[in-house]
Image (cartoon, grey):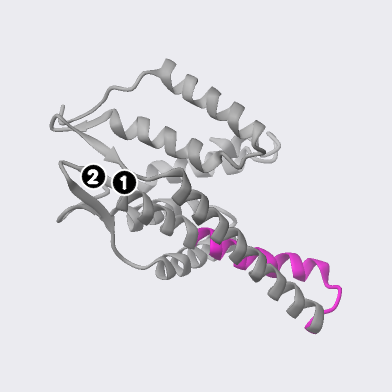
Amino acid sequence: MNIRYTGRIGKIYWIWFTNLILQTITLYIYRPWAKTKIRKYFYSNISIFGDRLEYSGTGKELFKGYAQAMLYLMILSAILSTMIAIFLGNASVIEAVLSYIPLMALLYYAQYSSLRYRFSRTRWRGIRASISGSGIKYMWFRLGRALINLLTLGFATGKSDLMAKKYLIEDSSIGSVKFKLNGNVSDLNRVNAITLILAIPTLFISRFW
């Protein structure tokens, strides 16, 4: 095979356990360093044509990213709460809905930015991975698909998920070599439909699948 993974389950459990202890002791401040440690292990055990991937990201860089994201979220929430209080008063339901939209927008943008960072720290044979495109465009794309999912009572979720993955994967490359996704939306739609039908009888536990 051209792609091999040589990691060991026992090692992963040990890294996970030590990360859990350190995150608990530090009240989850250690989380960026924990994620970095896991990524470095996974990447170093993936080989393509006999050469391993390299991950050069650091916990300090992730921590700065998290801190910036939290700051933006706090500022956005404060601005939104002030505007709602001025124009709508104590409309709690409307406030909840309007607060949810910018939160999701920020989440989608952060997802794209996170992948861009991760790729910028990934090397294979000294060749850097990258993701082109725009986090803003991805954010609007995901918000549009979220609205479609809502209007179709969730039955478009399978197609939306596949389109989102395709958007990310086909914007990605190693050097000049672009990635390609060949997914089958019918398989996702079948699972999505079955778990939606079973959602109420199973108290939505089926949606985990």
**Nearest the eye: 89 or 174:** 174
Task: State left or right for residue 117 relative to residue 86.
Answer: left
Q: Evaluate whether residue 179 shows in this view.
A: no
Which amino acid is tagged 1? Answer: Gly
Residue range corresponding to the magenta coloring? 87-108
Seen at 36% across and 49% down, the residue is 118
- Camera-side residue of 198 and 20: 20
Q: In this rendering, is residue 116 above or below 123? A: below
| Residue 135 seen from this side | yes
**Residue at image mark 1:** 183
Side of 186 relative to 102 (left or right): left
- Residue 156, horizontal then vertical, whole percent: 49, 55
Who is closer to the viewer here, 51 or 201? 51
Residue 136 appears in which quarter of the rendering? bottom left
Where the N terminus falls, by quadrant? top left
- Name the disc covering residue 123, or none: 2
